[in-house]
Image (cartoon, grey):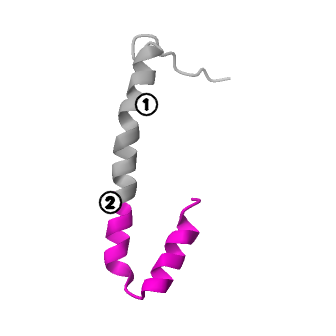
Amino acid sequence: MLPAPYFGMLLDLTGSPYPHIFTVCGIFGALGLGCLPTIYRSFIRLGGNRNYIAPGLN
């Protein structure tokens, strides 16, 4: 949510937003995939599926 206004300003400044939309979405997708190994390692370190306990209903 934080980069959205800056991305909007970029689109306003360039005047041709469509190629930039795909570029920025690709960058955010790559960043998300880059974070995935770190999150997975933390999940496994904390016990993974074997130690997962679903939250109970009150």
Q: Which mark is residue 26?
A: 2
Q: Amino acid at mark 2?
A: Gly
Q: Is residue 29 left or right of residue 5?
A: left
- If the image is split into quadrants, where does the C terminus sit? top right
Query: In the image, what residue occupies the spot 44% across and 12% down?
Result: 47
Query: In the image, what residue occupies the spot 36% across and 74% down?
Result: 20
Q: Which mark is residue 27?
A: none
- The secondary structure that dominates the magenta segment is helix
Segment colored magenta: 1-26
- Indicate whether 19 appears above or below 55: below
> Of helix, strand and loop, which one carries label 2?
helix
- If the image is split into quadrants, where does the N terminus sit? bottom right
- Indicate whether 2 appears above or below 18: above
> Of helix, strand and loop, which one carries label 1?
helix
Q: Quadrant of residue 24?
A: bottom left
Query: Which residue carries the number 1 mark?
Result: 39
Q: Quadrant of residue 49?
A: top left
Q: Label 1: how many residues lie within 10 Å, few (<14), some (14-19) or many (20+)?
A: few
